[in-house]
Amino acid sequence: MLKKAAKAGFDWSDMGQHWPRSRKSWAKSASRRRARRPRVARKIGDLLLATAKLSRRQDWVAEELLGEALRKFELRFHRIEKLPPRPAPTSARCTKPQLLALWQRAKSGK
C-alpha cells in the first residue's frame, strides 16, 4: 500500500521531514495529561506508519526490522532474568535505577 501511495505522490520528497513531523505530532498528543486513549492510540499508529514509510524509503522491510528488534529485546530480557540476585531482578522489588543498570549489563552481554 505504501508503494502505491508513493507512486501517487503521497510521500515526502525529503525524508528529513519525517522525524520533525513525527516528534511534533507525538509531543502534541503525549503532552496532554488527560489525552484520551483513542487519540493517543491513533497517534501511535501514525508514528508506526511514518516509521514504516521511512524504512520503505531505505529499501528495508519494516516487519523484519520490528521482528529483529523484538528478538533483541527478548534476548536482553532473558539475560536479565538469569542475573543474580534471586528472585529474578525483574521483580517489583527492583528500583528503576537498578533495572536500568541491569538493562545496560544485558546490552553489553556481561
Image (cartoon, rainbow, N blue to C red):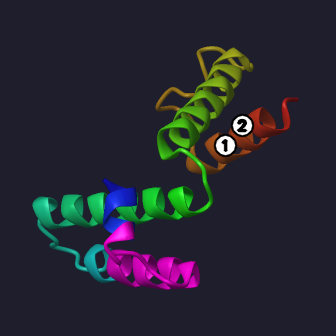
* x and y, in percent, of residue 108 in the image: 85, 38
Name the residue nearer the viewer: 101 or 5. 5
**Residue that appears at 55% across and 84% down:** 14
Element assignment for label 1: helix
Q: Is residue 86 magenta?
A: no
Instruction: Classify 10 Å Cα crowding around label 2: few (below 14), some (14-19), many (20 and above).
Output: many
> Which segment did they paint magenta?
7-27
What separation in Å lies between label 1 and label 2 (alpha carbons)?
Answer: 6 Å
- When asked about the image quadrant of residue 36, the answer is bottom left
Label 1 crowd (10 A; few <14 / some 14-19 / many >=20):
few
Q: Quadrant of the C terminus?
A: top right
Mark 1 and mark 2 residues within 8 Å of each other at the beta carbon: yes
Query: Which residue, as the protein is rendered here, is positioned at the far front?
Result: 7
Pointer 1 residue: 98
Question: Helix, strand, or loop for circle 2?
Answer: helix
Does 20 lie within the magenta span?
yes
Per the image, the residue denoted by label 2 is: 102
The image quarter in which residue 88 lies: top right
Q: Is residue 56 left or right of residue 73?
A: left
Label 2 amino acid?
A: Leu
Q: Position of residue 42 (x, y in %)?
A: 20, 62
Which residue is at a point 55% across and 28% down the rendered structure image?
90
Task: Pinpoint residue 32: horizontal percent, then vertical percent.
Answer: 23, 79
Q: Is residue 88 above or below residue 14?
A: above
Image spot of residue 67 (x, y percent): 53, 33
Above or below for 67 versus 12: above
Q: Main secondary structure of the magenta part?
A: helix
User: What residue appears at the point 66 percent right and 43 percent down from the top-left corner?
Assistant: 98
**Residue 86 position (above or below residue 76):** above
Give the residue type that dot 1 points to.
Gln
| Residue at the image position 31 percent from the left and 60 percent from the top | 44
